[in-house]
Amino acid sequence: MGRITENHSKQLIRQFGIPAPQNDVAASPEEAREIAKRFGKPVVLKALVPIGKRGKAGAIKFADTPDEASHLAAELLRMKVASFPVERVLVEEKISIAEEWFVSITIDKSKKAPVIIASTCGGIDVEELSRKSPEKIITYHVDPILGFCDYEAKEIWSELGVKGKLLTKATGVLSKLYRLFDSTDAYLLEINPLVVTTDEDIVAAASVMSVDDSAMYRHPELKDIVQIGSERAWRPLTELEKQMIAVNEADPYRGTARYTEMDGGDIGFMCGGGGGSLLSFDALVSFGGKPANYSEVGGNPTEEKVYGLTRGILSKPGVKGLFVAHNITNNTQVDIMAKGIIRALKDLNIDPSKFPVVVREAGVNDAVAKELFVNAGIEYYGDDVTITEAAAKMVQRMKETYGE
């Protein structure tokens, strides 16, 4: 999934006719002061990071004057929220709040359908509300074929006790939010709080949004605002991780190549997805190996994708060896894997006799792959050797080569 920061999600929200506070982005205290001065009213300052629950982290501040906005922006810009350093601040007009509601639209994987979660008790931890007062929350599944109609939006708010003109406005806002969710192939669109102002307007005061990055080919208009692959990250993506996302996305229709950079490490790690890759990683560590990355490759990737991933894995400073392993592939062509890996090693002028490379591959066309690997001077094992045994051999090769 790809996250969208709040400034961009608010732009999309306004494009769909949903009221949202006036805002701008500041990268320095001085910029925050100028924005607050331009707005001419009290402002809210929010750490612009691609995660929610910023209020709990102390990453949302309120300022009555431009000077106070500058001071608070300086505080925010020195913070980390989770593991994300705050590099920009969203400066937003403060609105007069009468009530705080909550709306979240996401995909229910078990039902394989969009689900709308709504409450007139917003601005708080909804998970806690669901435990203490589940009757105050409505959960409504949407038929993905028939879509979401205005009358359904009206029923949701009516059941929550909303009446009169406010019901009409709330119906329109929820219908538009769902259209935004559906038309952008979103995975999550959360508004908390959805504010009822003292003038009885309904405003999206805070938003969290992520989209299905597998559908980005349908949304070139979102290309510059979606942080592809960020949903899997617990920290900002490194430059190398961004490059590997580009390798994967260059051919999104065949195979998957995922890469996560680790602190330190000297063994490039390139293994099959799911349990096999976790087993391989744990086996390396158990024998004293130090993986430099965690990588999954599968789904019958092209030679070019394997080549790009291999080059990326080997380009990290400090990598002194490469471990490649699958369990037994049922669709990935092992000979194609071999061609991509061997080409990357050659292009990087890596000599397998001096640079430890251990491959444990079995499955489709593995006899051809074995011939390719062996002819390239690469230590190859098939299904007669377990992944754990191959990991032990990798660590042993590292010790023999580098004397560690």
Image: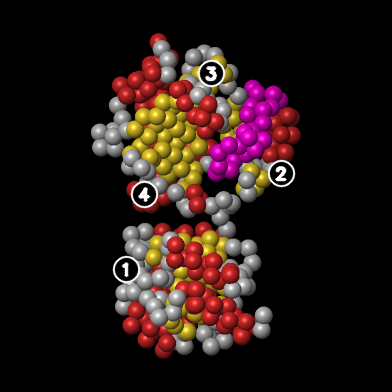
Q: Secondary structure at mark 2?
A: loop
Residue 101, compared with residue 5, is above or below; it is above
Q: Closer to the camera: disc 3 or disc 2?
A: 3
Quick one: label 2 or label 1, which is nearer the N terminus?
2
Quick one: label 3 or label 4, which is nearer the N terminus?
3
Location of residue 321 (image quadrant): bottom right
x then y, percent, for residue 287: 59, 73
Residue 78: numbered disc: 2
What separation in Å lies between label 4 and label 2 (alpha carbons)? 35 Å
Q: Quadrant of the C terminus?
A: bottom right
Amino acid bearing label 3 = Glu
What separation in Å lies between label 3 and label 4 (alpha carbons)? 36 Å
Specify the segment rendered in magenta. Answer: 37-65
Disc 4 target residue? 215
Residue 60, compared with residue 95, is above or below; it is below
x then y, percent, for residue 349: 52, 83
Q: Nearer the viewer, residue 375 or 50?
A: 375
Q: Secondary structure at mark 3?
A: strand
> Which residue is depicted at the point 59% across and 26% down?
93
Q: How many marks?
A: 4
What separation in Å lies between label 2 and label 1 (alpha carbons)? 50 Å
x then y, percent, for residue 319: 59, 73
Residue 72: numbered disc: none
Colour scheme in the image? Answer: secondary structure
Disc 1 target residue? 330
> Which residue is depicted at the point 42% across and 84% down?
373
- The stretch drawn in magenta includes residue 267: no
